[in-house]
Image: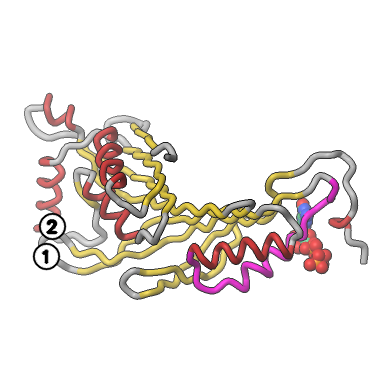
Amino acid sequence: MEDIQKQVDTRNIALKKVGIKDFKCPISVLDRENKSQNTIAKIDAAVSLSHDIKGTHMSRFVEIISEMDRISPENIEKILDNMIEKLDSESAYMKIDFDYFIKKLSPVTKIESLTDVKCYYEATKDEEFKFLMGVSVPVITLCPCSKAISEFGAHNQRAVVDILVDMNGLVWIEDLVKIAEESSSSPVYPLLKRKDEKYITEQSYLNPRFVEDVAREVALRLEKTEKIRWYSVKVESMESIHNHSAFAYTEKSYI
Ligand SMILES: Nc1nc2c(ncn2[C@@H]2O[C@H](COP(=O)(O)OP(=O)(O)OP(=O)(O)O)[C@@H](O)[C@H]2O)c(=O)[nH]1
């Protein structure tokens, strides 16, 4: 059977990434409390393609991903090495998006429930291995300006804190969630009784935060986290008084 992918290409254009996108499969990730947590991943996987080869062998990505067991920085590097070898390439890339579930206690009634946090691992292997972990944490922001100029009340809304880190050691997802929540007007919770709702309404009012405040508070805490050598922070507040968001972004320059 003819192997079109193997044909020579003469246009002299190398491709940085060729592969598969949005491949879904069950995975198991590290979990601080229970050692591992089963979830569903959406995976992009790619390799570089030399200028003189017509196409990559897409089926091999699925073969390699299907052999994956628990996802951790160590075994992601092995998977990328496997992709480089099996697809005869110089570099490999993988992005793994997944929902991670964290136990939360309601603030006053202390009732336990599970909340989901969108996370992703993004890894590249060429001469070196680069691994980034990202979390998107939903929080509440209450506007300091609205509070200061109003007789009563202040506009407040859900916001999302996106933290991306380059780690030199294991940083737990739970620790990044805690940093985001401590930096905002209040965390959000899956389960709230009226006593809890009263508490977070007042807690938010006592902790007004611009998006700029949240970004700076998160950056301050990440600076103090020794296992983080680089980070970026993006805070987007879905403003309740506008049909657009407010946002703030910062990142640490690599030393
Ligand atoms: N490179 C490339 N492959 C594609 C494209 N569209 C479909 N294919 C894939 O071609 C694949 C089959 O090619 P290979 O993966 O090389 O399959 P194979 O040659 O039988 O398997 P190997 O012996 O491992 O190379 C199918 O899985 C399709 O997904 C495309 O745009 N580019």
Q: Which residue occupies the extreme left position in the image?
A: 151
Residue 190 locus on image (x, y percent): 26, 60
- Residue 163 covered by magenta stretch: no
Give the secondary structure at mark 2. helix
The residue to which callout 1 is attached is 109
Q: Residues within 10 Å of mark 1 (few under 14, many from 20)?
A: few
Q: Is residue 43 shown left or right of residue 230?
A: right
Most distant residue in the right direction: 2
Residue 75's place in the image compared with 216, above or below, is below
How many marks the image carries: the answer is: 2
What residue span does the magenta drawing correspond to? 52-72
Judge whether 59 appears above or below 142 on screen.
Answer: below
The amino acid type found where label 2 is placed reads Asp
Outermost front residue: 255
Q: Which mark is residue 196?
A: 2
x and y, in percent, of residue 88 in the image: 76, 59
Residue at image x 77%, y 60%?
57
